[in-house]
């Protein structure tokens, strides 16, 4: 199977698409200025205790207070609290003075707290904490927090206030497990726990020691920043959000990684060189003017894979509905009902194919929480069991924790899937860019006149000579038809080397312009200029009349 990563870097967000044999199986979108992301660490203050929920609401600076449950305090909360007394002294003068930074390795680990305790016994209103985001803000809810902070690397996860070493269950060899355990025991700092990740298998002492030291330095820098930072504020985040996303999806099986931004390409190449030096050559810069997602046929797959209705083989389709509490998926046979030898075998065939598409959709949209699937009814017990087994098989490669229940007597399958961020919901329907939903549009025949006016404004008023205007593929084909096309005449008349290219993500009669540095030029200012010039003209006319 050929695996490729396509990274589309835009001014406000980064999109990472994973292709397997050219088929889109995973899509992640990250804002370049995102806040309150999973893994970020904040200094925060307890705002309200909720004994009925056995939880607290904490102010981390978000518009909604964050949620901290008693069980998310962690078993080592007593040691954590004792350590924070030195980080956040009660006396402001002690905090501002150049007092030596507390060292966790010199502390004695205190006994674990009671699992069945109450939040009121451990926290007080106004208490300052060092918390980590474990679930991003979703819908009307604020972030979810934990005081069990951790630092994630490629080979391991470092956990302060612990002494436990855990090994990934995906490492099957007993000898390798023993080797890694002994190695980590010999190099890990005191009072730090470690989770050994699957990628650590076969790695040398030097590689693991280097990452251990890097993660410990992150902890020390975080504590140092917490001592002087105002409350609430961010004190730790990934060096590069893009590299953080890549770390979770990267595999040595990738044959190529295409990036359309030189700076981001350098970051990714540096990261790949560290973790898999033999794979550094697979990172390639995409420099064509055509949008990178269009070039790899990703835009078309996004349009067909997202939305309420998703079709798959032989005319069958599924309908996906999102609610506040759960996701509902309905399987329909469509034209496929006419095929097959009998109804029962036809239903099994459609359900098996639907299971493949549903497993893909869960990964693609990052759907989490409760998912209820209404499969086509089947009477035979062996067919129902075969569908259940197949769904478990196709979901086995899903990195998110999940649980699948057998079909109920109503033909419903219940799935729970780990949710740490909002589901990716891309609207595939297009609002009319000309009328904005009013139902009346300007004559489409005059759209070329509008484009020429915009080009004239860019070249003669803004003095832009080297830019790219993206339009819908239909419009691009129209203006470039014929030997002496409108496009060629425009370039000759304006005397500029601009380009007009198709972009499948644009709606009909919609356009956008990028300068030579790939920054979008906002043409809304032109309207303001027109209005102001019109006002000035009217004023001059009035003055002359007077």
Image (spheres, rainbow, N blue to C red):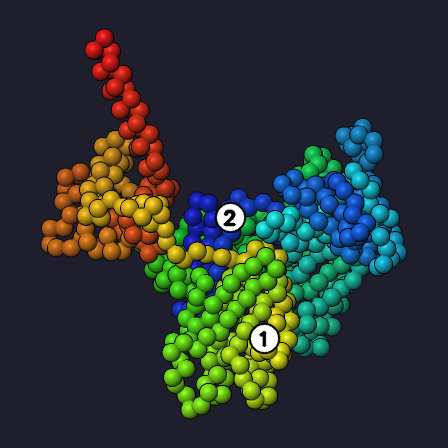
Residue at label 2?
31
Q: Label for residue 226?
A: none
At mark 1, the secondary structure is: strand
User: From this viewpoint, which residue is outermost toward the left?
Assistant: 483
Residue at label 1?
412
**Mark closer to the chain start, 1 or 2:** 2
The image position of residue 256, as x and y in percent, is 43, 64
Other residues around mark 2 within 10 Å, as few (<14) / some (14–19) / many (≥20): some
Task: Using the numbered discs, state the Cα–Cα distance from disc 1 to disc 2 in whole angstroms.
Answer: 36 Å
User: From this viewpoint, which residue is outermost toward the bottom?
Assistant: 341
> What residue do we see at 15% from left, 55% from top?
481
> What residue do we see at 41% from left, 71% from top?
311
- Return the residue nearer the eye: 220 or 539: 539
- The answer to whether one can see residue 444 in this image is yes
Q: Which of marks 1 and 2 is in front?
A: 1
Q: In this view, does 89 lie to the left or right of 240?
A: right
Other residues around mark 1 within 10 Å, as few (<14) / some (14–19) / many (≥20): some
Q: In this view, does 29 lie to the left or right of 303?
A: right
- Return the residue nearer the eye: 113 or 437: 437
């Amino acid at each position: 199977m050929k695996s490729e990563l396509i990274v589309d870097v835009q001014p406000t967000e980064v999109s990472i698409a994973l292709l397997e044999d050219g088929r889109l199986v995973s899509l992640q979108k990250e804002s370049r200025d995102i806040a309150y992301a999973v893994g970020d660490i904040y200094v925060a203050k307890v705002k309200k205790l909720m004994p009925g929920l056995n939880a607290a609401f904490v102010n981390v600076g978000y518009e909604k207070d964050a949620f901290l449950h008693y069980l998310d305090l962690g078993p080592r909360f007593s040691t954590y609290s004792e350590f924070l007394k030195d980080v956040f002294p009660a006396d402001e003068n002690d905090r501002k003075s150049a007092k030596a930074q507390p060292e966790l390795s010199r502390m004695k680990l205190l006994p674990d707290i009671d699992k069945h305790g109450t939040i009121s016994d451990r926290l007080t209103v106004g208490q300052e904490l060092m918390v980590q985001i474990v679930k991003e803000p979703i819908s009307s809810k604020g972030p979810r927090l934990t005081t069990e902070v951790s630092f994630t690397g490629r080979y391991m996860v470092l956990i302060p206030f612990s002494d436990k070493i855990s090994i990934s269950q995906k490492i099957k060899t007993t000898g390798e497990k023993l080797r890694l355990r002994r190695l980590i025991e010999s190099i890990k700092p005191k009072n730090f726990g470690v989770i050994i990740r699957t990628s650590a298998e076969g790695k040398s002492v030097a590689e693991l020691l280097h990452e251990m030291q890097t993660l410990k330095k992150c902890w020390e820098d975080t504590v140092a920043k917490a001592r002087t930072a105002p409350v609430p504020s961010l004190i730790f985040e990934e060096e590069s959000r893009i590299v953080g996303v890549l770390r979770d999806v990267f595999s040595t099986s990738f044959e190529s990684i295409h990036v359309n931004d030189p700076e981001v390409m350098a970051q990714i190449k540096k990261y790949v060189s560290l973790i898999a030096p033999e794979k550094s050559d697979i990172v390639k810069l995409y420099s064509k003017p055509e949008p990178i997602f269009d070039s790899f046929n990703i835009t078309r797959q996004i349009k067909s894979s997202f939305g309420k209705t998703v079709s798959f083989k032989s005319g069958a389709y599924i309908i996906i509905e999102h609610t506040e509490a759960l996701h509902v998926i309905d399987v329909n046979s469509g034209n496929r009902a006419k095929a097959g030898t009998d109804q029962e075998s036809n239903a099994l065939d459609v359900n098996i194919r639907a299971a493949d598409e549903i497993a893909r959709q869960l990964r693609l949209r990052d759907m989490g929480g409760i998912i209820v699937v209404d499969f086509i009814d089947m009477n035979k017990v062996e067919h129902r069991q075969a569908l259940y087994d197949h769904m478990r098989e196709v979901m086995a490669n899903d990195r998110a924790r999940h649980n699948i229940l057998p079909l109920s007597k109503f033909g419903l399958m219940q799935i729970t899937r780990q949710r740490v961020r909002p589901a990716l919901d891309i609207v595939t329907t297009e609002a009319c860019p000309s009328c904005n939903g009013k139902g009346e549009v300007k004559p489409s025949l005059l759209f070329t006149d509008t484009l020429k006016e915009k080009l004239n404004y860019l070249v003669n008023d803004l003095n832009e000579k080297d830019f790219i205007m993206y339009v819908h593929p239909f419009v691009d084909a129209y203006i470039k038809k014929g030997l002496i096309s409108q496009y060629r005449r425009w370039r000759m008349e304006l005397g500029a080397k601009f380009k007009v290219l198709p972009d499948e993500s644009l709606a009909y009669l919609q356009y956008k312009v990028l300068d030579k540095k790939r920054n979008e030029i906002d043409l809304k200012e032109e309207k303001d200029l027109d209005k102001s010039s019109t006002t000035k003209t009217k004023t001059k006319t009035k003055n002359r009349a007077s």
